[in-house]
Image: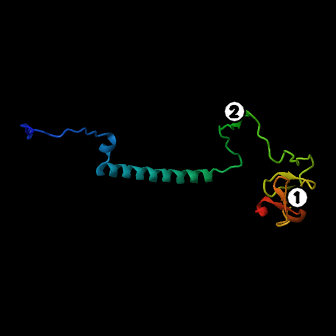
Amino acid sequence: MTKRSNPFIEDFVPQSKVHVGMKQFNNNNIRLQSVYEKTLELLFTGAKKSTVQNVIDNSNTTASHKRDNLKQLFIGKDGTLLHCGTITSCEATLIQCACGSGKETSCGYCEKPLCSKCQHLCASCDACYCSHCSLPGYEGAELCVSCYN
């Protein structure tokens, strides 16, 4: 026996869910054109304000500098940010070699401070390296890590 035909086929409309969100609603040409024009207007007014502000700043240059209300953050030993601390100057700290002598040169590879006793010369490039960055080569000569390959 064959399947019986549907008597309501003329009234049948396939049902499907259609969701129209704000993105689909705003994605028409008229709306996009108005957004484009507003963006251009904001860009041009911002450019005009910045040029006027630069002229005002350049005309008011004096010897006194304005102090900002910004604060320096410091990294603690456990990696957290601290709101208090002191800034140490790089020049104020005395850089010493690992053996305790003063610094004469620095390693060409890892930039550790080296004294005249701790520096090793590369036989190939004649640069100073520390004992960690130089390797024994042929006939007792020392080679740096770069020249060893």
Q: Which mark is residue 120?
A: 1
In the rendered image, the vertical position of residue 105 relative to residue 5, given as above or below = below
Type of amino acid at the residue the image marks with label 2:
His
Q: Secondary structure at mark 1?
A: strand
Relative image position of residue 3 (x, y in whole percent): 9, 38
Task: Give whichever of 40, 12 is nearer the camera.
Answer: 12
Callout in the foreground (2, 1): 1
Q: Quadrant of the N terminus?
A: top left
Task: Give whichever of 37, 10 is nearer the camera.
Answer: 10
Q: Which mark is residue 107?
A: none
Type of amino acid at the residue the image marks with label 1:
His
- Return the disc, 2 or 1, that comes first in the chain's sequence: 2
Q: Residue furthest left?
A: 7
Taking the spot 83% from the left edge, 58% from the top edge, the residue there is: 135
Relative image position of residue 24 (x, y in whole percent): 31, 44
For disc 2, the marked residue is: 83
Taking the spot 45% from the left edge, 52% from the top edge, the residue there is: 43
Q: Quadrant of the C terminus?
A: bottom right
